[in-house]
Image (cartoon, grey):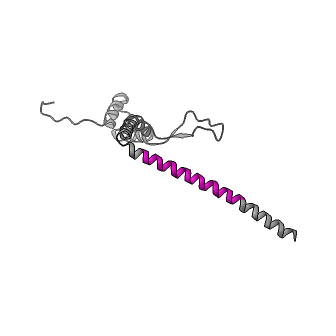
Amino acid sequence: MAENDVVVPKTFEEKLREKIKENIGDLMSNEDLKKLIDASLQTVFFSDRPNPKHNYSSFGGSEPARLPPLLHELVKELLLPSVKELLVEYFKEHPDVVKDALNNVLVLGIGQAMMQAMSMQFQGQLINFQNNVLNQIQNR
C-alpha cells in the first residue's frame, strides 16, 4: 500500500464476513456468506427474541414470552445515562416549567378522580332508581 492511498474503513458486516471467510475457508460463496450474515444480523439485532426467564409451562406468568430486539436494549443502555443527565440539568435550569407541569398533572388528576367518583355515585343512584321502578311495575 502506497503512502498516499486512501483507506476506506470497513463496516461491521464486512469485517464479520472476512473473519468468517478466514475460518470457514471456501465452504461458502461470498454471496451465500453475505446472505447468511445479513439474515443473522437482522435476527440478532432487529427481531424480538425469546425470554429465557419466561415459564412456558404456566400461562399468564408475569414474564413476557418475548423480549424487544437486542439493538433496542443496547441503545437504551447507552442513552439512558445521558438522558437522565439532560433531564436533571433541564429540571435545574427550568424549575418553574417543571413546577407548572406537575401542578397541571396533579390538578387534572385530582379533577378526573373527583369526576369519576361523582359519576360512580350517580350511577349507583340510577341503578337503585331503575330497580325501584322495575319492582313497582312488577308488583302491579
As drawn, 34 above or below 109: above
Q: Quadrant of the N terminus?
A: top left
- From the viewer's side, name the closer residue of 120 and 96: 96
* Quarter-of-image position of residue 31: top left
Picture coordinates of residue 115 (x, y %)?
A: 60, 56
Q: Main secondary structure of the magenta part?
A: helix
- Residue 25 in the figure: left or right of residue 63: left
Picture coordinates of residue 58 (x, y %)?
A: 66, 38
Magenta stretch: includes residue 75? no
Count of residue discs: 0
Magenta stretch: includes residue 117? yes
Q: Quadrant of the C terminus?
A: bottom right
- Residue 19 in the figure: left or right of residue 115: left
- From the viewer's side, name the closer residue of 84 and 115: 115
Identify the residue at the far top of this view. Answer: 23
Instruction: For residue 40, say whether it is visible.
Output: no
* Quarter-of-image position of residue 75: top left
Instruction: For residue 47, say whether it is visible.
Output: yes
- Give the residues in magenta: 99-124
* Quarter-of-image position of residue 6: top left
- Residue 63 in the figure: left or right of residue 82: right
* Residue under the point 85% across and 68% down: 138
As drawn, 51 above or below 100: above
* Residue under the point 55% across and 53% down: 111
Picture coordinates of residue 91 (x, y %)?
A: 39, 40
- From the viewer's side, name the closer residue of 109 and 84: 109
Picture coordinates of residue 11 (x, y %)?
A: 30, 37
